[in-house]
Image: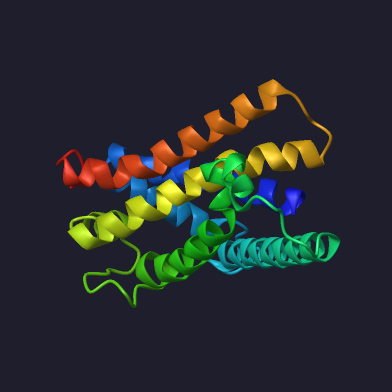
Amino acid sequence: MAVTGLVIVAYLFAHMLGNLKVFLGADAMNEYAAWLRRIGEPALPMGVFLWVMRCGLLLMVALHIVAAAQLTSRDRRARRVGYVHGRRRSLRGFAPSTMRWGGVTLALYVVWHVLDLTVGVANRDYVEADPYHNVVADFSVWWVDALYVVAMLMLGLHLNHGIASAARTLGLAGGRVGIVGTLVAVVITAGFLAVPIGVMAGLVG
């Protein structure tokens, strides 16, 4: 679970950097997207590497979910009798308590996000090979912004607790680990949120 989580974090960071190209204008954003589709040419047909990467990411997400289910099952089998004090769970903090439902929320959002901006079936203004237009059109709709903001805030909570847990699992304990996890969570969340905020504020479009 730790390894797949860290792979996903690395992808999220790279994806965030790519999204921020929207602030450089349509040409920069669209050229970056075109470059992603050209990776592997001429050995691979155009776009194949990108779909291989997407499938690899989906595999990591699937393995991450399976690992989470297995760990939850082991945890329940290890302690068949609940804690006497029902409020003990709240002492763990807000972010850890949201890991399960936050993960479910993010999984559902990813499906919608792919249908919306990758495939285009959920975006009425979708234009093939014009991601800049698609992003601006998407985030010009208030309820799309609301969904995105909620999903990214859940992502931040998930990352904040998940990175620290993964680091401890891999033997990297210490107070600095928590600080680094929080910093990474804040940077990635802020980076993703900058795009819809930029569109709503008129900085992009």
Give the residue at the far top of this rendering: 176
Residue 80 lies in quadrant: bottom right
Residue 61 in view of the camera: yes
Whether residue 109 sits left or right of residue 24 in the image: it is right
Left or right, residue 202 beside residue 78: left
**Residue most extreme to the left:** 202
- Residue 122 rendering spot, x and y as whole percentages: 32, 75
- Tell me where residue 190 sits by quadrant: top left
Q: How is the image coloured?
A: rainbow
Q: Residue at x 74, y 48 (%)?
A: 2
| Residue 28 visible to an observer of this rendering | no
Rendered location of residue 55, percent (x, y) = 63, 68
- Give the number of marks: 0
Q: Nearer the viewer, residue 75 or 164?
A: 75
Q: Which of the image's four quarters has the N terminus?
A: bottom right
List the single residue furthest toward the front: 84
Where does the image place residue 198, in percent across and percent down from the top left? Answer: 24, 41
Image coords of residue 188 (percent x, y): 48, 39
- Residue 24's place in the image compared with 71, above or below, is above
* Residue at x 55% of width, y 48% of height: 158
Q: Is 20 positioned to the left or the right of 166 in the image?
A: left
In the rendered image, the vertical position of residue 135 relative to residue 110, given as above or below: above
Residue 81 or residue 90, whichever sits in front: 81
Q: Which residue is more in the foreground, 46 or 110?
A: 110
Q: Nearer the viewer, residue 13 or 103?
A: 103
Residue drawn at x 37%, y 65% as measured from the top left: 117
